[in-house]
Image: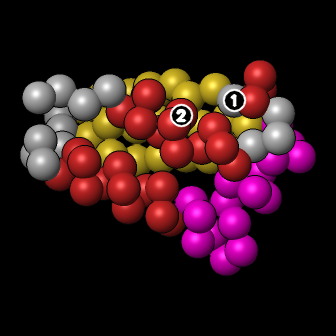
Amino acid sequence: MEVNYEKLIKDLVFPLVVHPKDLLVKKFSEENDTLTFQVIVNEDDLGRVIGKNGRIANAIRTICYASASREGKRIKINIDSF
């Protein structure tokens, strides 16, 4: 079963942000079995998404890694603001 990673990431990040209109999740590249995603949020929301010492960002990555590993893929998530 194919997982829609863009929707998964968006569903995980959406409740954290104050400016949901500025949330953008985009597949950046797909090389071999590695998928790279770019998460762009409003500058005010960056701290909320990353969390203290990066704990929230690591939790989001862990959930996505687990989902991707079931399909034999690797996933990288970059979080940035504009």
Lateral position of residue 55 relative to residue 64, left or right? right
Instruction: Please say whether residue 8 is one of the residues in the magenta stretch.
Output: no
Q: Is residue 49 above or below residue 81?
A: below
Q: Earlier in the sequence, mark 1 or mark 2?
A: 2
Q: Amino acid at mark 2?
A: Lys
Residue 77 position in % (x across, y down)? 48, 46
Task: Identify whether 4 is placed above or below 44.
Answer: above
Q: Which picture quadrant has residue 29?
A: top left
Any mark on residue 23, and which?
1
In magenta segment, residue 52: yes
Q: Secondary structure at mark 1?
A: loop
Residue shown at the point (69%, 29%) measured from the top left? 23
Q: What main secondary structure does the magenta stretch of the protein show?
A: helix
Relative to 24, is 29 on the left or the right?
left
Looking at the rendered structure, the secondary structure element under dot 2 is helix
62 shown above or below 36: below
Q: Which label is found at residue 10?
A: 2
- Residue, x 69% and y 66% (percent of image)? 51
Q: Taking 44 as reference, is 29 left or right? A: left
Q: CA distance from mark 1 to mark 2?
A: 8 Å
Q: Amino acid at mark 1?
A: Leu
Q: How many marks?
A: 2
Q: Residues within 10 Å of mark 2 (few under 14, many from 20)?
A: some
Q: Residues within 10 Å of mark 1 (few under 14, many from 20)?
A: some
Q: Quadrant of the N terminus?
A: top left
Q: Which residues are magenta?
A: 42-57
